[in-house]
Amino acid sequence: MPYQAGQRLGAEQASKLGHLDVLQSKFVQDVIASFEQPELEPGDTSSTPWIPFTGEHKPLRYIFAVDGSLQVLKSEGVICREVAFVKTALLHLDPNEIASLDPEYPHPNALRKIMTNSALFHATVFPLKNIRIERVPWMEGVRNLIFESLRDPTLEGEPYKTLKWLLYQKWDSDLHSSSPSFECPVCHKEQTGLPYDSDHMVCANCNSKLFVSDVLGLHMEMADDGAAESLANAYMLIHENLMLFTAIRYFWEQGNTKVLKDTLFIKDGPLTLRAQYSKMIPNIRSFLAFANSRDCPIHICGQEKTGKFVDHLASIVRYAAPQKNGDKANLAILSHRFIRDEVQRVQAGVYPYGCKTNYGEKVYIKLNPHHALVLSIPTGEYLNHEDSPSEVPDFIGLERIIATLPGLVSYRHECALVPIELVNGIASLSNYPSAKVLKLFARLV
């Protein structure tokens, strides 16, 4: 590990000739000599279970898309200070307007017209390093900040209402359930959960005031005097899901199931919440199964753009149909066993893939010779079997989701969808000029 650059002196540089000793090692040479390059396989060695997408299915009429971004800014003074700006966005789109766009060269004015009065966004900022909060201890101040950020008045507190709706399972008026259990941020005593519809409670062990936002466990990303970038990233991922389900909750509470089951909700990224945040996953699954059982399927898909699944699809997609324009689309449903053996390439664990963290299962879809996607689509309750999911009916609304996708294709980027492109344009905070402007605003000098 080299010395880093300081205020007076430069960084230590790695040796330009250090590799020579490695290459001259007899042991290293013998090991390399034992390697063999495998012959190029004539086909897909993972035997990806592609099947043709058949039948005539009605595309969904309404589109909502959600995305988020963050930007960490560091000061240039002797004492390095850091803050993180977070932004999430929800965009409503009319498929007829999307269909009118040129998929390769959409006119900027047409894009601006589509996005006008169609988007909601949320923004907040987190102190990460060497930042004090007036009049309160650092961790208490950030916990208050998280609570108030979720209640963002510019969105009339709607994501906060959605958080409570999910934690207390308010979609079923007969339940009146408490929140999931959580750890007190102050004394670390396990709490059985907040009473139904509560905003806060008092810890019986240390008498500290606890917020409903503490159930999420964001305080576990903090130390007593600072936090890592993971705090802002975790908040962003949680808020993306809250924005997505805010639109769903709105139609559900209005009783407008006709529109709800004719709408596609698209998320940039997989349908997952990891680590301590996964405690929300069982409730999300329960709602999706509850709605589906009442003839109101909720059509949700998340598109993955990077990662192991995207890499695996890129390595085998050339062998799959369709091979020419006009042919039927193909899809591959990835079972937990297939994911473990062919994508992750790991031994079997205690829990099947995604058992604790995912509310969507993986599907590959090849729409045409040049457009293949990795999607996460819900099944409702988790299918706890290594060979599941295995067929189209395992998913909620898979056929209508696939029927909708051809009308959303964009050729501006590799395997892109127009709704995700547009919402990313609203939510993204680029390094330049966004970071420069934010840095001036934050006065991190």
Image (cartoon, grey):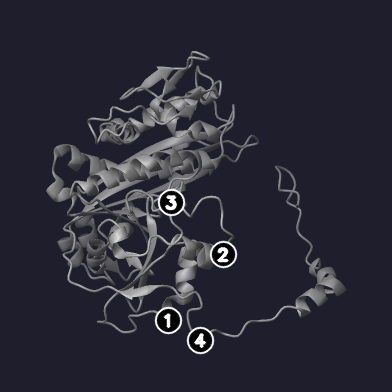
SS at badge 4: loop
Q: Name the residue under label 1.
A: 319
Q: Which of 56 and 436 is in front in this view?
A: 56
Please tell me whether mark 2 or mark 3 is closer to you in this view.
Answer: 2
Identify residue type, mark 2: Arg
Judged left or right of residue 108, residue 79 is: right
Q: Distance between the residues labelled 1 and 2?
A: 21 Å
Closer to us: mark 4 or mark 3? 4
Distance from the alpha carbon under mark 2 to that under mark 3: 41 Å
Which residue is denoted by mark 4 in the rendering?
42
Residue 88: % across, % down: 36, 45
Which comes before the other along the chain, label 1 or label 4? 4
Residue 174 at x, y = what percent? Answer: 23, 30
Residue 2 in view of the camera: yes
Q: Is residue 184 above or below residue 129?
A: above
Residue named by callout 3: 433
Residue 179 rendering spot, x and y as whole percentages: 38, 29
Q: First in sequence: mark 2 or mark 4?
A: 4
Gap between marks 1 and 4 measured at Cα: 9 Å
The residue that label 2 is drawn on is: 345
The Cα atoms of the two marked residues, 2 and 4, are separated by 21 Å
Amino acid type, callout 1: Tyr
Query: Residues under labels 3 and 1: Cα distance?
Result: 42 Å
